[in-house]
Structure formats: structure tokens, C-alpha cells
Amino acid sequence: MSETTVLPVPGADGAFGGPDELAAALETTGYLPDEGLATAAFLALAMHRPLFLEGEAGVGKTALARALAEVTGRPLYRLQCYEGLEASQALYDWDFGRQLLHLRAAEAAHATADTETLEASLYDRRFLLARPLLQALEDSPSVLLVDEVDRADDEFEAFLLEVLSDFTISIPELGTVRAQTPPLVVLTSNRTREVHDALKRRCLYHWLAHPDFDREVAILRRRLPDVTERLTREVARATAKLRTLDLLKPPGVAEAMDWATALHTLGARDLDPDVAARTLGAVLKYREDTDRVHAMARGALFGGG
Amino acid sequence: MGVASHASRRRDVVDTVLGFARTLRVAGVGASPDRVEAMLAAVAALDVLDATDVYWSGRLTLCAGPDDLERYDSAFAAYFGGESPRPVPPAPREVQRTVTTAPLDPGPGEGDGDTPPEMSGQASADEVLRHRDVAELTGAEREQLRRLFALLTPAAPMRLSRRRRPGPHGAVHASRTVRRALRDGGEVTRLLHRRARPRPRRVVLLVDVSGSMSPYADALLRFAHAAVRAHPAVTEVFTVGTRLTRVTRELRLRDPDKALAASGSAIPDWSGGTRLGEVLKAFLDRWGQRGTARGAIVVVCSDGWERGGTDVLAGQMERLQRLAHAVVWVNPHKGREGYQPLTGGMQAALPSVDHFVAGHSLAAFQELAGVIQRA
């Protein structure tokens, strides 16, 4: 395995001249980033630094990784984090069952005399099950999405830090795997717990806020072309209003999309208060929130053109 | 452009960025050298002369959390002049008051100046001190109690985690079993097992630092410090007054006095009023519901004096109990004889409290440590 140091060469990725170009490319896939996000994604590509995205649920953190994979033409590997996630589920695992079969086959063929060769044949690449992190390094260049990293426990964070600092994985039985081009890493967090500073320091940090009204309308229009423009605008306006109400769970873009789809499915052409009240379950996910909104004057929320 | 002028321009950029990083550090954003280096790389990848590009390259590399963003914006505006090119102007907020020091102890004078500095009969005095109300202590006795606080090591409550460890029984650990079999020439001779590994449960302390609690705040924060020092990864401490302040980071300092001084200067609303319900709501919105309170043992240390309406407090306590594993309420006045929880806040909170305990003396704190461990 040759030692190669990959220096961060600005613009080495070649494809994009600047944040604006990347934003335009992302827009063709249906993802509409704002200026800050486009700059963040561009720098992540140019500087080979992981991008750490934080923000409310449903603002499009995961969708960005998908869109980036699409515009760069790279394969996407996703690692969903959860408590108790272990290295064998994130990196690699040996396929013990097949190893055992291999051993039995060798026995049957009376080929077990040379133990050294036998052992070497047991720990062959074909018995290695690559998990997302290893896959992303092997299939370089790629996009690696580490989703909801705040849900994994701190042991895993330390381990992730190790992999992300030099993009190598060493497998004792096989050797070191190094990415020829570091993968574009997108880490997302819902801030259920504070992620360690050491991990954040290696990343570009971006806080993703809810989109403004015009952008939200544009996103909804792009994703749901069948829904009438009038309904889209009214859903966006009502969703924005809901976000100001200090709810337990303010609706994100994903919820706005669900709501518009629900209304469209019911054949609504605009947001009339009755249909809105019946479909409120698509945007509000807490009983307390629903009660509060129901108690409000309907006109206050859904009225007006 | 010649080589010399190119080099000098590069130096200009470096100087400017370093100066900006200094400004940021003063504003409270910890722009560490490696982050500054990252900003230089980011600026190089973009356009140095474009204000927006400089803004974003700094914000993406130097900031570490949403709290930093506002400070970053104002520091950027101050350093580079003009408005920060942030697309959405931040809503006008209450101006953050920087507080220099907070009265962590009443200090000498004020009636207790004539106490003897040395106490005779150390052991029995310690024993008496353990049960004395901390609000009624003299300066020297406080000093004595501080030393005793250092000996307090609250044990963490445990829970089962999703992580597994090898064990004598439990589910079969397939990979270890097969690995063992490979060593034995492909013969499965013995089944190996694994079971859930216990992990410490999170403990969240909400310490009321309002005026009515000021005789106890020092002792409560010392208890919090002992808890944080014992299990830094799973203990969170917030102070509650007219606003919510997270002091976990400050309390991680080893020396109790330094830790208390650091958290004292981080608390802007020391000895002010209480808006328990609203601050509890802020805690739940910002931290609790996202995960800090989920499955945790939440300890509220307050006398239940509520300046705002008690409806908010009752509602938020219900919400807290739904999220938390157990809710413990520590009221220093409960240690007094004939105490009745009559304050409106206490009345509103009690239905959602699992354990209601006193917190007025060292012995009470030891008991509290036991309650937390068993909760």
C-alpha cells in the first residue's frame, strides 16, 4: 500500500468553479440551497473537510447529501447512527459463516496440511463484509452520509474522529485501506446532545434554518409540481405562521410538503379552514400543539388570500 | 501582479484573519488556531475580496454551535465595518448582560466576623455541621463544610444500554462463537454469550439561583460540581432564574472554588427573580425534548417561588415528567420543622414530582445523592 498524502487543493474537484455553480447544479436535482449552504458544500468539496450540519428536524439535512451525490456523480453511502452502534456495523465484519464453510470445504479436500496458507485464505477480502465507512473509502470518490451522529454514543464519536482525520481504516488481518480521494462527508445532527468539540473542529459547521417564504414556495413548487400554485403559497404561509407560535415541534419543510400533498390528495385547490383543520395531523405531531391551533381563531391562521 | 506584491497581499489576508479571530475570541467564540487555519484555507478557496465569501468562510470554520452565530455576526460587523451580510437579520433580542462576579458566599463581615477561625473537637464538629442548615452557617463553618463537600462522590444511577458485552449467559454471541470454532478447527465446541452492558444514566440538575434561594445556591452548586466531577459525560447542570444558563462546562474544572467562580461569572441572573415556568420551558424546548431530559433523572433545586403564573409551571412539569425517567425536587425549606409546601409554584409542581426531598444540609445532600442513585 503506497503512502500518499492528499493535500487539500482548492478547486481540485474540478467540477465546480464556485458556490454559485454548485448551487445551480443542486437546483437541477430539485434541491434549492441558500447562499450559506451552497458555500458550505462547495468548501467541503474543495477543502476535503467533512460538513457538519445541524438544524431542526425536516429542514433538508439528509436530502442535501443525496443531492450532492447526484450532482457529483458519486455513489452515496449512508450510515444511520443509533445508540449502541458498534465498529462492526460501521466499518467491516468478517463473514464468519462463510469462513466456517470454507474451512470445512478445505478439510473435505484434505487441504488443511499447510496451516499458514489455510489461515491466509480464511482472512481473504472475499470474506470481509464492508459496512458504510469502509465502502465509502473503497469506492472512492464517494459521498458519505453519517446521519444523526448525535444519537450514537461517545465511544463511537471517538472512533469516527479517528477515521475522519486521515480517511484510512486498518484491518489487522488484511492491511490498511486508504481512500484515493477523501470522500465528501456530510454529518448531520438534530442536537439531541452536544457533539464533542474535537469532532466539530475537523468539520465545517453549518446551522440549517427553516427556509424563508419565497424559498419554501420554490421548494414546494419544485417537489410537488401537481399542487396548484395558490395552495402551495397558502401552505407555505400557514406553515411559516405555525413556526412563530412557539410549538413543541415547529413544522419543517418535510411537514409542509406532507401537508400540501395531503391537501392535494383531498382535492383541495386552496387552503380552506375546514380541510386545513382536518389535515392538521400532517404538520403537527403533538396533541398539545394540535389543541392550541384548534383553539385559535381559524381565520387568524388560514384566512386571507 | 508580481511575486512580492502577491506575497504581501497574502500576508495582509493572514493578518486580517488573525485580527478577526482575536475579536471573535473577545466576543466569546472560541476560534482556536486550527479553526483559523481552516478559515484561511476557506478564504483561499473563495474570493478574498468578496465580503459575503469572507463572511461564510469564517462562519463555517470558526463557529461551533448556534450560540456562536449571533456573536459571530456582531463581531463580523464590528471588525469589517458595515452590516454583516447575513441573509436573515436576527430578531432583536434582550441584550446579554455581562456579569463580572457573583456573590458565591456572603463573605466576611456582616455579623459573623467575630467567629473563631479554628474549631476545637474537629470530628464532632464535622458531625454537627453535617446536619446544620447551610443558610445559618458562619464564615468559618462554611469553609469547613466546603472541605466536606469535596468528599461527596455521588454514584451514578445505571441503566441497560444497547451495547453488548460478553457475558456468561444471555443471547448467543454468534461472531465470537464462530471465531472460537475457527480456532478449534471448525468445530463448535462451546456457545459464547453476550448481554447488555449497563451504562450510567444521565442526571440533569436545574439549580434555582434567584434571590430567595441565594443562601443555598453556593451549597447546591457545590453538590452539582461534585456530581459533574464524578461523571462528567452524563451530568448536565443548568441554573434557573430569570433565564436559563448552562454551567456544565464551567463546573468541569477540577478545583471546586475555580469551578464555582467560573460558573458564577457565566450566570447573568444571579440573585434576581424567578420565572420558573418559563425557564423550564426554555430548558425543555432547547435541551430537554431534544434528548437531554429523555430517560434522565432530572433534579430541580428550588423553593418553588414563582413570579410568573403557576399554570405554565404546572404544564411544563407535566411535560418534564413525560420525558424524564424520574423527577426529583429539592427544596431546602423542606428541612425545616413544620414545613408545608404551600407556595403556588410548589403546589403546581408537586403532582409531577417523583421524589420530594430536602436540601439544606450536607446530610440532606448525601441523602439526595442516594435518591438520585436509586431513582
Image: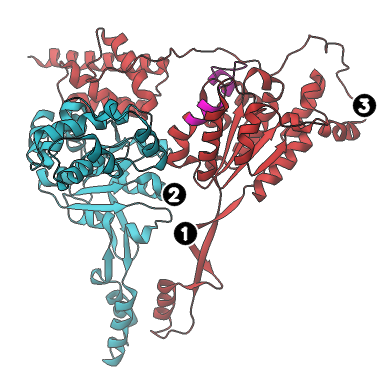
Q: How many marks?
A: 3
Q: Quadrant of residue B71?
A: top left
Query: Mark 3 to mark 2: distance in Å?
Result: 50 Å
Q: Nearer the viewer, residue B73 or B334?
A: B334
Which amino acid, mark 3? Ser
Task: Give the x, y percent position of residue A203.
Answer: 30, 36
Give the extent of the magenta segment. Answer: B263-281
Asked if marks 3 and 1 touch (Cβ < 8 Å), the reply is: no
Q: Are marks 2 and 1 in contact (CB under 8 Å)?
A: yes
Front residue (pair A254, B167):
A254
Q: Which residue is mark 3?
A: B120
Residue under numbered circle 1: B163
Helix, strand or loop at mark 2: loop
| B143 relative position to B301: left or right | right
Mark 3 lies on a secondary structure that is loop
Relative to A283, is A287 on the left or the right? right
Q: Is residue B19 left or right of residue B369?
A: left
Q: Colour of chain A?
A: cyan
